[in-house]
Amino acid sequence: MAPPSPQVSKAFRAMAAIGISEQQVKPVLKNLLRLYNRDWSLIEAEEYRALADAIFEAEDAKVAAEKKKCNNYDQEDMEAESHPHHEPELPLTRLRSRSQDESPSQKKKSLDDEPVDNIEEDFSVPHRPLKRLRLQNHECQVSPSSNTCNPTSGGSLLIKPKVEAEELLDTRSAQQPQNTSHSPESRPPVSPHSGIKDKGKQPLISKPLALQGKSLSERSSNGVRFKETAVEPGIILMPKQNVNSLALITPKDEPFTDDMAQDEVPIAMIHPDESDNVHRPLLTEGATGKQHDEPVASQERESRNDTPVLSNEGSMNDGLATIPEGSPSNLGESSCLEVASSPSGEVKLSLSCSSAIGRPGFHMPNLDAILKLTEEKCLHTYKIIDPKFSLKNLLGHMCESFLELATNSNDESQDGSINVAPNLDSLQRSPAWDAVGGNKETLCMQSCALNGPVIMDCPSPVTDPEVPRIPFTLNGNCAQVSGTVVSNGFSEDNVDESLSLVVVQNSDLTPDDLRTIHDINDIARGEERVKISWVNERSRDRPPSFFYISKNLVFKDADLKICLSSIEEKNCCATCFGDCVSASIPCACAYQTGGKFAYTPEGLIKDDLLEECISMTRNPQPHHLFYCKNCPLERIKNDDCLEPCKGHLRRNFIKECWVKCGCHGQCGNRVVQRGLNCNLQVFFTSEGKGWGLRTLDGLPKGAFVCEFVGEILTNKERHQRKIQSTRSGRRPYPVLLDADWGSKANLRDEEALCLDATKYGNVARFINHRCLDANLVPIPVDVETPDRRFYHVAFFTTRKVDALEELTWDYGIDFDDHDDPVKVFNCQCGSKFCRSMTRSNRSRSASLAR
Ligand SMILES: C[S@@+](CC[C@H](N)C(=O)[O-])C[C@H]1O[C@@H](n2cnc3c(N)ncnc32)[C@H](O)[C@@H]1O
């Protein structure tokens, strides 16, 4: 047993001095370390004040949760009596839950249940049995007994979507007492990749809410448990109530959630001075939509600090120069900030958020609430500690700065830092973009004000192409277009496009803009054998800009050599000729698939192999799993609280013939390497999933559709990107190549690889997730190297797929695993087995029961 680090011991001692036991300290400290990215100075500051606060709040919450629990139990007892035969309608997942209950993972004790002796171990490299087992497609829960490695085994695949996504608390957690009995019926459905989902098997403070402003949401039998889920960026999160601006230091971007239970108050808050009026609407008296006549954009000095605020004075229609500042790195790819000023010194700011377009359930939030929530996010993200901080003031400062810079002729930033070009999104929404095709002037439409997709008005024709204009309105709730209020998504019928246009010079287009324009007819830009069209029947959004590659490419550090010399006799069929699949005796390449070729002569994957792959993916058994002693995924976190390997799923591999084989290029055992051959289309989904991929032709069961192509990264690089993407707002879509990690002890970081299609990728980056019954299954395929640290991730149809049906695969997300660093989205897959859906159903019924 390794001793705890001196810092940990010191923290224990400091807490002991104020009467807090190590047992109380440990879980909170662990999570603070995570939250603070192991910045001990934050924890040690002010005599460990943050730590003490978090512990005290956790204790308070325990009491509150206890009360709630009692209430819920009473209610549930009543319900149980009135519905004694209620069964969840997910036989598959229930079945799996049962097996999970029997899994060794279930024997894991909760952190707080551990004897005091074990506490120290948590702060050393864990060589003890898993204290928590988690199983997902990518980070699977495993049995300690399965710590064996199968060199021929496949690996699990992982999409880690949107690390920058914001988190929501799981209201179910807040509303339901923790089920410690783990009865299968009471469990939520599990990830098809996970096989095991053991909620409540250990109390965990995944984030010290005292320092995040989050409320306590759940209490376990012997500790506090915070449950969170995530929501993708673009969704406006509304705190329910009791959420005040926090004046505290929070090292990570952990925004408030809209699932905060009503009686929960964020911990360690310092309430802002009410007299500060921080929650006054940014734009006053403008909620009527009468923007043409209303005065706007004057500077009204705030009494407290003399910063200008935005109010409605003067006409915004005359002489306003619009300066869109499309800065994806700051605002996210679907947002842009616009600054408009008039010669008389009036300045207005407008935030466009196109990701709200077409989002189901979109509604106009209250402006006060938006300001409040944004302030809270600022407080968290930027560690602003002044309780008087106000977004309104900040925006006022921005207007001031704009005026200063705009009127100072010596300031060089006029040409540099303020971009007169529209952002990409604006271009993409342009109805006239196709028509002008990148000519001297380009027309684009701006949409969406502070609070959603609002079409902006453009009453005056543009006369000077050097000064693009987007006269617009920001009235707090919605804007008017030609007399029609458009408040929720594009209402194309109502839009008078001529009034919503702005002239932008072609020279202002970024390379990203231009690339997107080139992609109009073929998103693959000729890189594939077939063209891939795209269509958006719901809005004017265009697909995101990225570099299309049809083959994986090493980014930098990946230790991957593809060389002929590594292909031995046994790895190829040098003596074959013609078509191996039609030969009477299977060649050496069929060895990996049990001496039978994986494909039929028609090029479909054979049914028995396919069914096995599907079953393994949807319902993995313990023997499908292995875990590494020193898991690269855990190691790269460089965490004091190094967790044991969460496990990896074995999969069946397909081995295709290749250049060292004697057969010809059209051999039936060369399917994936020939690339995609289906008529696919990228389209904008109607369910709020963004873009998706569909097939234009019907596909038979077992057909190869495409592979997941991207940059080959080490997981260390992935981790670094993840951190960067959180800052920049870009969304990484990595897929782990962890099939063979177990075959080598101490895999070096350069050997632990994954694929990232965020910037360089193929059409697979558009395939959305579907829980359990997806129509695609990913299968690892060996082509050019027997080294299974790298392989192709190929998608095959799990059943017959109709023309125009969306193609989906199960990312393996465990929507209930709030300890997972992957931030999940609000699943809209529509499957009756949707794991996210059943969770919210449970949440709803729990709240009904209250
Ligand atoms: C690999 S991308 C798929 C393409 C993506 N829809 C787009 O527009 O680029 C994964 C992202 O798509 C969205 N997504 C995928 N499946 C979803 C689902 N079932 N429900 C909601 N959003 C989904 C999530 O935002 C996720 O982070």
Image: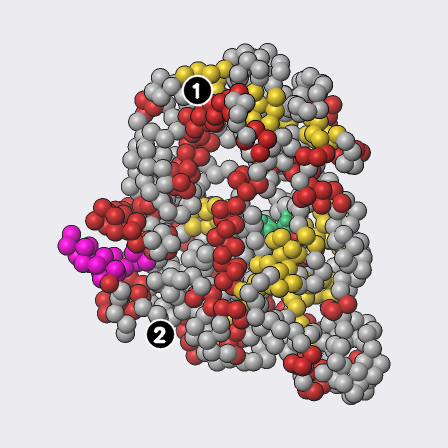
Q: Residue at x 83, y 83 (%)?
A: 577
Q: Nearer the viewer, mark 2 or mark 1?
A: 1
Q: Nearer the viewer, residue 434 or 841?
A: 434
Q: Quadrant of the N terminus?
A: bottom left
What type is the residue that disc 2 sits on?
His
Tell me, yes or no, whether the highlighted magenta stretch contains residue 173: no
User: How would you rate the neighbour count of disc 2 (Cα within 10 Å): few for under 14, some for 14-19, many for 20 or more?
Assistant: some
Q: Is residue 459 above or below residue 568?
A: above
Q: Is residue 135 above or below residue 266?
A: below
Which range of residues does the magenta coloring cover?
7-30
Q: Is residue 542 left or right of residue 639?
A: right
Q: Nearer the viewer, residue 560 or 240?
A: 560
Task: Report the residue marked by disc 2.
Answer: 127
Task: Report the residue marked by disc 1.
Answer: 308
Main SS class of the magenta portion in the image? helix
Q: Residue at x 72, y 76 (%)?
A: 656
Name the disc covering residue 490, or none.
Answer: none
* Label 1 SS: strand
Q: Is residue 837 above or below residue 327?
A: below
User: How would you rate the neighbour count of disc 1 (Cα within 10 Å): few for under 14, some for 14-19, many for 20 or more?
Assistant: many
Q: Quadrant of the C terminus?
A: top left
